[in-house]
Image: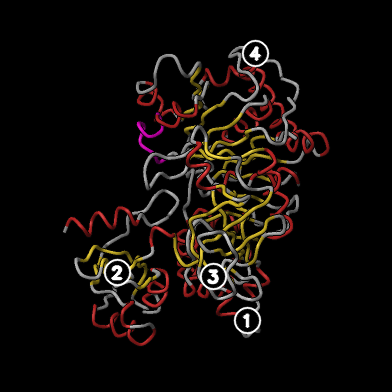
Amino acid sequence: MNVARLLARSAHVHPGRPAVLHGERVLFDYRELADRAARIAGHLRGRTGLQPGDRVALFMHNCPEYLEVLYGVWWAGLAVVPINAKLHAREAAYIVENSGAAALFVSEDFAAELAGLLPGDGVRELHIPGSAAYGALFQSPPLELQPRDSDALAWLFYTSGTTGRPKGVMQTHRNLLTMAACYFMDVDAVTPDDVMVYAAPMSHGAGLYNFMQVIKAARHLIPESGGFDADELIALSQRIGGLTLFAAPTMVKRLVDRIEATGVAPSGFKTIVYGGGPMYVEDIRRALDVMGDRFVQIYGQGESPMTITALSREQLADRADPRWPQRIASVGCAQALVEVRVADDGGNPLPPGTTGEVLVRGESVMAGYWGNADATASALRGGWLWTGDLGVMDEDGYLTLKDRSKDVIISGGSNIYPREVEEVLLMHPAVSEVSVIGRPHPEWGEEVVACVVCRQGQRVTAAELDALCIAHIARFKRPKEYRFLDEMPKNNYGKVLKTALRARINEQ
């Protein structure tokens, strides 16, 4: 089934419900949104001459046009290639060329530079949302919704490429519909009064979370800032209410800081789904204290989009459970439509409490990597997706992540999991952020280095942090050096770039 049918259904059943908002202003209802998508589809299949399965790239900031372009592409029976708007134009050009995209929608400030980097025989048309030429697309007659097989490519998502060239993850219509079903079962209920706020990039998880709102004919709000601004979100929560958003842990932390500082009631926020990186125990404790039971954690990858495990608001709120401190350090239990195991190198399940690689299988798992048979064969083995993440599962099925396998520090033959050390260092009230990495050592193989960012106006010494580590973890795990930084290098989604940190440390 074509995921665009979700929009067609809501437009038919609830045509007058508001669909797209820019800030507080309603731009389109569901009838209008579906009509605009159908006209974009009519242009792409008619004038541009694209055929079912062709790819269309989106190199765009968050903007009101993003949803209509997404659905216009799917409506036409084509596949979307969403590109991170923070990438360099050369990186975006690689993705456009590698995916074989036949058409491109690009924000105006990227258009000239990107166009100059593309080969002349690739992209047939380039469209700039908001321009007069873009407005002319809606003169095209609306196209009838095109059928697609559930296993056809829908969303070609390129990984971050921290270990080399980014790989194109092939997400099918079935994958995305499975993700949507899991959301209703494991993450949150959705009502027509809800408002999904796209404060995180729509090219990533936030954009994937549009389907559930479309199914329920709820509202989609693109902030006027186009991104994350804590004060803007707080104002929207007070004036509109019912806000739901997907946020990286760093965004959650900044929002909590601002709400605590201003004393504003958090009642206008309905649900904050967090994922995309580790949420440390001290941070989620504080978030719950400040904002209450509004949080849900999900763990997923591009290869199984948003759909591996979930930790519900009820589980996060259940402080009476004697194992609550351990529960909130986990990423929850397997979502309803997938199987998850912690396995050894042969894929055999390990007993509870034993660290191994996290494997997942189910209808959410990708079809493979675009044009990369070797990478596909490495990631999809024995019917399972090998995530590259290390974790431990308890006897009740709660999964706690340790680290990416490539981030584990091996010192003197012993494995040291950076997150374990980071959790301890974050216990110090002066520490705002920390990232633990390994540095080559001639005798031990690697040694532990902690990069630390202090809270504004506060200080902490290496000796204090060392004493904290000695009090909580084995001596061999404690950092051999503490580097104090003004800020961490991060990608646009708030993930700390450990590769950049390693390069910085090794240069000095």
> How many C-alpha atoms fall within 10 Å of the one at disc 2: few (<14), some, or many (≥20)?
many
The residue that appears at 21% across and 66% down in the rendered structure is 441
For the record, the magenta segment spans 86-93
Name the residue that disc number 2 marks: 450
Element under label 3?
A: strand
> How many C-alpha atoms fall within 10 Å of the one at disc 3: few (<14), some, or many (≥20)?
many
Magenta stretch holds residue 90: yes
Name the residue that disc number 3 marks: 392
Q: Amino acid at mark 3?
A: Val
Earlier-in-chain disc, 4 versus 2: 4
Q: Main secondary structure of the magenta part?
A: helix
Indicate the position of residue 124 as horizontal and vertical percent values. Answer: 50, 16
Apparent side of residue 457 relative to residue 73 in the rendered image (left or right): left
Element under label 2?
A: strand
Q: Are marks 4 and 2 in contact (CB under 8 Å)?
A: no
Apparent side of residue 172 relative to residue 354 in the rendered image (left or right): right
Q: Amino acid at mark 4?
A: Gly
Name the residue that disc number 4 marks: 46
Say which quadrant the C terminus sits in. bottom left
Q: Tell me the mark number nearer the camera, choosing from 2 and 1.
A: 2
